[in-house]
Image: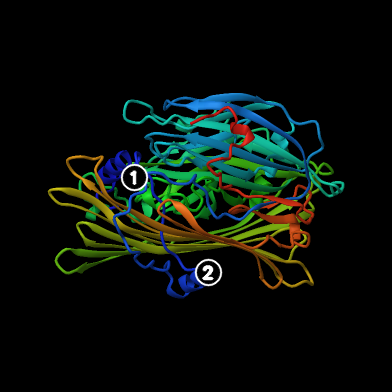
Amino acid sequence: MVASKNRLFLLQIILATIDVPTALPSDDLESELAQASRTNVAQVPQPISLGSQLFPESENPYSADAPIPLFGKQCAEMTVIKNAELSSYGQVVRAQFFPPSCDWSQAVLRLDGAVKGVQFDRFGIVWLAGVEILRLTTPEPTMKGIRWQTHRDITSAAPILKRPSNMTLQIPNVVDKTYTGVIQVNVSIAFFAFGDAPSSVALPRLVRPLKDWTEPSIFSIGVNGNQTQNNTLTGLPRNMVHASLELFASGHGCEEFWYTNLPDKYTSAGGCGGGAYREIEVFVDGILAGVAYPFPVIYTGGVNPLLWRPLTGTASFDVPPYQFDLSPFLGLLNDGGAHEISLVVRHNNKAGVWYLDGVFHAELDPSLSNLSGELLHHSDVVPPTNVSVTQLGANGTMIITRGQRRLTLQGSLRDSQGSLLQMFSVVQVLDAFNNNTLVSPDLQISEGWMRSTSAESKPSVKSFVRSAWFPYFVSDESRQDKNTFQIGPTFVNYSRIESIEIQRVGEPVFHLSVAGGINATALYNRSLSNHSLVYKERSHSEEASTLLAGTRASTCFRKHLSADAGFTDSERETPEACDWRNTPLGLYACGLSFCRQLDGVGRSAMGFLPPQHRLQESQEPAALSTIFL
């Protein structure tokens, strides 16, 4: 942002001793998203009435994320990492994991955290058997202390959950005289057994990390600038009938707010350059296999920390991974040889870093062996990224960036006799718009959107189209005179909408959609000479989520939260009533992502877990019973 590095650093130190929340979207997320679609940018939030009210404390942070449906009764729960206290940058916590004895079909991870005092928001990773199962960021604390809780469905990691292994947790942290917040964490896994027997069509699965490591580490997965992360997979089975890559990715340093970055030519000394267009690329043996736009996650200290109390930014506690269908490459991957999977962030800023961690998934057919095939078609259309600059008066500059891409893949899979088993195709279309306007030396407005679709061939369905829509708006202002320093009024409004459309032969299209968005505004003003003398703290936020499922694309869940001065003032929620039993391929929405039944068969939900459960001050979850603030 404007003076981003120094200003954000200074602000986080100051605000860690106080507390505040967020701001103002429409009452109905669907109408907000419809408006965003018409205008091609996120809806501009309206200013709130900013007063001098101070609020040194706030509720425990949480979000409006949709609940995770549970399809059976809990048969086991275990706390794997217990009472971890993270206080140093290179600290790694490890614990042994032993699978439960019950015959389970769904697994949900839960992270319970607590922190108090002065601390930045920190990011971290949870691995099991070297496989990443959660990418997280932590909230900034109050002096009294806060707790938070995150759930994530990890059923897709079933193969590694069925054998003993090690769980690893890393959250680089610094504790000293200034930053006093020790981050306390427990990590648990709950297992659920279904009443019905698993379908006989369930295929064995393979889950492997791209990194061949025994001791996972955050610091071995970072890429800067034009660096490429190369990973080699060896010993793959020769009976894989479906392959995909689950890629966890998050930008940090000068890449945390990459969509606000200006071209190098217009970046002042010490600022973040590189422009405002990014793509995540996946290569198989040097051939482009998939492209995705990164979602602009804003962590809980981002832009203005007062925005996120108590309602956290979308995807800030659980940063969802990106999904890539690698099935067109099965003919190559089934040859029994070594294969290189490479990861790149296109236009990555050399002053920033992206932490990229991939997980390879495959389904195996025990009745087949020595499969082969070919990559029959590969087309990558990459129009030049277009950047136009317009001067606005004496001090203003408007920089508009447009980027597009189209990737088409087709591959065959043949049995040991050379007979055709399956044709696989993937067609990806990406389109993005960004407008960074420097209104004055004190004010930058960043707005835009990213739209992408991926049409993928799947067995037993006529068509399968995955789409994403990410609109965003950020107004970032800071100023000071000889007596005071002020940040704001700050406005942030952004949404994440992921959708899938599936059509089986002879049936209507089945629509799935999970949408979440937040609209927040905040102001902070304090003395230049006495940083503890705060004149104004003010914020307001509204956050909403919806689920759609069915052939009529009807809403089956809606939640709307509103908070002011650090505390919730409105909470409305409809019961989750989605028809997961009739959803093709056993798909269901799980938080901000889509999950799939292990046997591909739809079921009705028997219960739910809220991904970010709001913890009241009097509540103390069992997994945190020995943690105190």
Pointer 2 with pointer 1, Cβ within 8 A:
no
List x then y, in percent, for residue 54.
33, 50
x, y (%) of residue 206?
Answer: 71, 39
Give, as a three-letter code, the residue at label 2: Asp
Q: Secondary structure at mark 2?
A: loop
300 or 572, which is in the foreground? 572
Res 339 seen here: no
Specify whether 525 is left or right of 529: right
Q: CA distance from mark 2 to mark 1?
A: 34 Å
Its colouring scheme is: rainbow
Residue at 34% x, 39% y is 17
Amino acid carrying mark 1 in the image: Cys
Alpha-carbon neighbours of circle 2 within 10 Å: few (<14), some, or many (≥20)? some
Quickly name the residue at label 2: 28
Pointer 1 residue: 254
Give left or right: position of 414 versus 53: right
- Please tell me which residue is depicted at 56% across the width and 35% down the height of the picture: 126
Other residues around mark 1 within 10 Å, as few (<14) / some (14–19) / many (≥20): many
When the figure is inspected, residue 222 is found, relative to residue 282, above or below; the finding is above
Which quadrant holds residue 334?
top right
In this rendering, position of residue 107 left or right of residue 405: right
**Residue beneath the point at 59% across and 46% down:** 246
Mark 2 or mark 1, which has the lower sequence index?
Answer: 2
Q: Nearer the viewer, mark 2 or mark 1?
A: 2
Nearest to the observer: residue 287 or residue 341: 341
What is the x, y in percent for residue 367? 84, 43
